[in-house]
């Protein structure tokens, strides 16, 4: 009797609690971030449930200044109360104003579709940044004001701390790059910190929790500074060596000591610091680094070091612009790689093959006499005789006599046993490392590869039954990693430039495979910093001034509008559109000022085409149209109805002008009928409805005439694949991406590529560019079938529609959306197609099950229409369409005796 009662009670308490669970708490896209200088940071979580069709109906957030308050259910900073809302992403903090340095602890609970509350989540936190310049103490310091290169400075100072320390936080802006040390230990694991910005407009500072490094009594702080982008002294065509912000390394650091008794002390950089040079005798973002281990100053970063021979630090000017917290994942070492082989093409010259093209360093491990100089030269190709070839990557350096140093590190041994070293204030793009000057013959262990990238999480992957496509996917991931080092870059060696066109072409792929939203958010601020009053943008961001006059045009500049547009579509981020609305408008107005009869003719156009070029004015005008539509849509969203109508009208006029200028009625084609021209018109929504089929047919014919090959540059490569997908010809697109001969991704791979190349020709250019990388987004969208839906930004709603094409017998895509994991996995087995999908709680998907007989579709063994959580919507040619709530589903459809076409 008693146990029966207990059971009833237990089941009551179980059913009173939601089966919905809030997890994965984030603040401004980041997990427990330090240094959030946003007054109303946005909080995000995910809800998990195993129930089908589960939804969140309300939430409650508690934010506390002390984790103990949170434990007892008190939100002294903010108690939102129960808010009826299904939203889980980007909830703005609306509690008491936050103070600089403040810790904010938070947790959230939610109510499920039946109105039952969940337990509270595990707590998370963020620490506020410094909201005001006046919150900084001390001064900027450095070692020199010299314009010419000086060895990397060391700066040090000792300080005393009491017992009873509660928290110690260091905030540091060390330009170009800093390494902060405390009591002999390196602080944090960030590399090449802080991120690159236009330093005279904005410099980034970084917060580190150093509580565990500070001890009662005497402590020592040490800072080493590198030049980075802050003082480029390699002469190259983009003229960073003339950047207006250029200055010798300098640093501003505040160490805040908070004691249990409420006292606060700050140790800051000022004239009391001492400075000397150290072992880094040369560092250059393009040139490389030299390290003379004989010049190490042992114990300089520990208490008790005799710095009487050092000089007082110089008090210097700051860079002048805003100080912003670095609110993005830092660059970190992603992995270490063993060399594949080492050869000796010439006596004493060793070439290591790392087996993979990537961005980073080689770590050297040697033993030998003091004074021995080992030289490492990095490149991505070798000559037929096995010697290093760099003619494809040193091309944009200004010619000097002797030629400038490029991607070269040197290490001078101190001669006391095994010495292990890698560069710290530069990075290289490479697969091969040439090593000379070794005291004895190397082994494979003499060098290790250290892979560097902004440490963004992975957020997706793709696999299928065609190994070639899997290799393209992997090469794309490697190219993206190699080209995300605090800004998206074009290539990691030759330029390291924030080329804007390359980045937006790769952005959808990036948002499906990775979680770079915080990096893009910061990069959009860089755009705002660079935009001229006239609205103009340079082709590279940041720039030292180069690039405006060049007229890279809207196919590049539109990154400023397209990336926020994608952040909205893929992550549900409205704020990024709102934040840059005025800048976006100004850009469109600038294009209007450059347009003639609605046509914009400036720009690079369909860059690096295969055989057929496309008029620049066609692609540039199409971006003008897209940009006007983005501005109009944002205006609508923000309730600026006048603007919305104005830009909608403008878009309509551009569309008319486009068709007037480029539609050739006699030939029934756009412009020269190139693949780019036709697909651009369709993809960008410029073709009048009655004409769409004709244009599509023209495009397919063009492709077929080329044996199923692509014949475009970087713009067309994105348009062609997407256009074919959106218009029911994924089969043709799949044929293009499966090609092994030129031009195509497969041809690169068969040439030994491990990353994507810069051109179809594969001539003397880079072998690690990301701008042809949208192909991976196409894999996700077309073959796995996971597609965002503008009706529910941030995957609140989405589509799963796999295309069974290309002879594939299985494909699988995973995307960790901002609302949780989405999976689509299909396989043809014994004549049946099995589609397994996973839909996160609180989202709704439209699932298009590939089938040859709509009535025969089953889910978990039942007729699909009768299955729980599923609603049959309609039949489409080749697909049965259902609306599906959260949960895991297993659809089956018969009749797949042959391999997919
Ligand atoms: C870069 C490209 C860039 C292009 C535009 C090249 O040098 O590497 O990726 O988009 O220039 O001019």
Image (cartoon, rainbow, N blue to C red):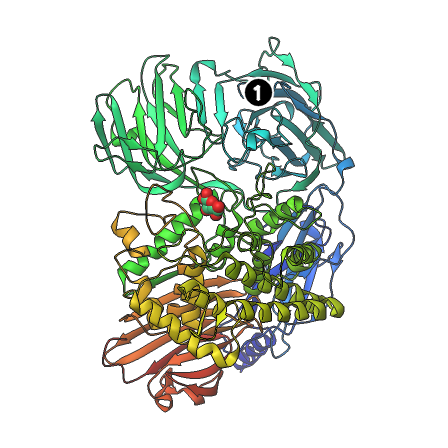
Asked if residue 568 shows in the view, the reply is no
Q: Residue at x 69, y 33 (%)?
A: 257
Q: Quadrant of the C terminus?
A: bottom left
**Residue 879 position by quadrant:** bottom left
- Residue drawn at (22%, 31%), measured in percent from left and top? 343
Task: Answer with left or right where residue 388 lies relative to residue 772.
Answer: left
- Figure check: 669 above or below 741: below
- The percent position of residue 630, horizontal first and vertical second, equals 62, 64
Residue at the extreme top of the image, as rendered:
309
| Percent of width and height locating residue 787 | 47, 69
Q: Quadrant of residue 469?
A: bottom left
Ligand 1: does it lie within 8 Å of the C-beta at label 1?
no
Who is closer to the viewer here, 817 or 608?
608
Task: Sort mark 1 into few (<14), some (14-19) or many (20+) by Cα contacts within 10 Å.
Answer: many
- Residue 606 position, x and y percent, is 45, 55
Residue 711, image x, y percentages: 36, 60
Q: Is residue 233 visible?
A: yes
- In the image, residue 524 above or below residue 7: above
Identity of the residue furthest to the front in this view: 666
> Which element carries disc 1, helix, strand or loop?
strand
Comparing 879 with 362, the one in front is 879
Q: Which residue is mark 1?
A: 154
């Amino acid at each position: 009797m008693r146990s029966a009662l207990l059971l009833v009670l237990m089941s009551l308490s179980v059913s009173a609690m939601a089966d919905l669970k809030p997890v994965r708490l984030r603040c401004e896209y980041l997990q427990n971030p330090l240094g959030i200088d946003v007054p109303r940071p946005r909080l995000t979580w995910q809800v998990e449930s195993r129930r089908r069709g589960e939804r969140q109906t309300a939430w409650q957030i508690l934010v506390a200044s002390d984790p103990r308050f949170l434990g007892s259910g008190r939100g002294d900073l903010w108690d939102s109360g129960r808010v009826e809302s299904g939203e889980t992403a980007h909830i703005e903090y609306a509690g008491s104003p936050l103070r600089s340095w403040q810790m904010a602890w938070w947790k959230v609970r939610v109510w499920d579709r039946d109105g039952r509350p969940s337990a509270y989540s595990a707590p998370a936190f963020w620490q506020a940044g410094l909201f005001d310049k006046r919150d900084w103490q001390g001064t900027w310091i450095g070692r020199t004001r010299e314009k010419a290169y000086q060895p990397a400075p060391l700066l040090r100072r000792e300080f005393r701390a009491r017992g009873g320390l509660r928290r110690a936080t260091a905030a540091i802006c060390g330009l170009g790059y800093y390494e902060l040390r405390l009591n002999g230990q390196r602080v944090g694991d960030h590399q090449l910190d802080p991120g690159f910005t236009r330093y005279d407009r904005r410099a980034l500072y970084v917060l580190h929790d150093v509580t565990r490094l500070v001890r009662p009594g005497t402590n020592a702080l040490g800072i080493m500074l590198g030049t980075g982008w802050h003082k480029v002294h390699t002469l190259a065509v983009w003229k960073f060596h003339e950047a207006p912000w250029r200055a010798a390394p300098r640093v501003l650091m505040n160490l805040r000591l908070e004691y249990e008794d409420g006292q606060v002390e700050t140790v800051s950089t000022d004239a009391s610091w001492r400075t000397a040079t150290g072992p880094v005798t040369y560092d250059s973002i393009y040139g490389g680094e030299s390290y003379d281990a004989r010049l190490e100053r042992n114990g300089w970063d520990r208490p008790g070091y005799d710095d009487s021979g050092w000089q007082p630090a110089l008090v210097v000017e700051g860079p002048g612009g805003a100080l912003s917290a670095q609110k993005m994942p830092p660059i970190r070492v992603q992995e270490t790689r063993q060399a594949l082989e080492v050869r000796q093409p010439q006596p004493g010259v060793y070439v290591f093959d790392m087996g993979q093209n990537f961005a980073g360093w080689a770590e050297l491990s040697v033993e030998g006499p003091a004074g021995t100089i080992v030289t490492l030269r990095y490149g991505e190709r070798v000559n037929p005789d096995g010697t290093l070839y760099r003619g494809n990557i040193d091309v944009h350096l200004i010619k000097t006599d002797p030629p400038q140093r490029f991607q070269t590190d040197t290490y001078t041994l101190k001669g006391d046993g095994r010495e292990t070293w890698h560069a710290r204030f530069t990075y290289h793009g490479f697969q091969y490392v040439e090593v000379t000057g070794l005291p004895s013959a190397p082994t494979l262990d003499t060098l290790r590869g250290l892979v560097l990238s902004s440490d963004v999480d992975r957020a997706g992957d793709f696999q299928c039954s065609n190994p070639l496509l899997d290799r393209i996917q992997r090469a794309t991931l490697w190219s993206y990693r190699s080209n995300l080092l605090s800004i998206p870059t074009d290539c990691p060696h030759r330029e390291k430039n924030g080329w804007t066109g390359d980045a937006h072409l790769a952005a959808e792929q990036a948002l499906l495979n990775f979680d770079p939203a915080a990096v893009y958010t910061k990069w959009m601020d860089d755009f705002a910093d660079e935009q001229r009053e006239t609205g103009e943008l340079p082709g590279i961001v940041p720039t030292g001034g180069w690039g405006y006059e060049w007229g890279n045009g809207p196919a590049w500049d539109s990154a400023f509008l397209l990336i926020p547009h994608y952040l909205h579509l893929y992550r549900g981020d409205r704020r990024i559109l709102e934040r840059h609305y005025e800048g976006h408008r100004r850009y469109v107005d600038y294009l209007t000022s450059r347009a003639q009869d609605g046509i914009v003719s400036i720009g690079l156009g369909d860059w690096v085409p295969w055989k057929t070029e496309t008029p620049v004015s066609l692609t540039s005008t199409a971006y003008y149209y897209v940009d006007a539509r983005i501005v109009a849509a944002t205006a609508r969203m923000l309730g600026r109805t006048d603007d919305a109508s104005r830009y909608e009208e403008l878009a309509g006029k551009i569309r008319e002008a486009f068709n007037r200028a480029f539609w050739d009625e006699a030939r029934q084609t756009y412009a020269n009928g190139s693949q780019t021209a036709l697909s651009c018109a369709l993809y960008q929504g410029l073709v009048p409805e009655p004409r769409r089929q004709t244009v599509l047919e023209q495009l397919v014919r063009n492709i077929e005439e080329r044996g199923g090959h692509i014949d475009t540059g970087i713009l067309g490569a994105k348009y062609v694949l997407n256009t074919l997908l959106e218009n029911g010809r994924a089969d043709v697109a799949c044929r293009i991406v499966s090609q092994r001969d030129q031009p195509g991704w497969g041809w690169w791979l068969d040439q030994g590529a491990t990353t994507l190349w810069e051109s179809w020709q594969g001539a003397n250019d880079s072998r690690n560019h990301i701008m042809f990388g949208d192909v991976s987004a196409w894999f996700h969208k077309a073959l796995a079938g996971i597609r965002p839906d503008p009706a529910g930004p941030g995957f609140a709603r989405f589509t799963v529609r796999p295309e069974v094409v290309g002879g594939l017998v299985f494909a699988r895509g995973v995307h960790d959306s901002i609302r949780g994991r989405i999976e689509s996995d299909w396989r043809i087995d014994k004549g049946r197609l099995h589609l397994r999908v996973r839909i996160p709680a609180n989202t709704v998907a439209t699932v298009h099950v590939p089938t040859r007989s709509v009535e025969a579709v089953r889910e978990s063994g039942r007729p699909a229409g009768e299955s729980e959580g599923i609603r049959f919507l309609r039949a489409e040619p080749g697909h049965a369409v259902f609306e599906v709530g959260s949960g895991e589903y297993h659809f089956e459809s018969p009749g797949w005796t042959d391999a997919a076409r």
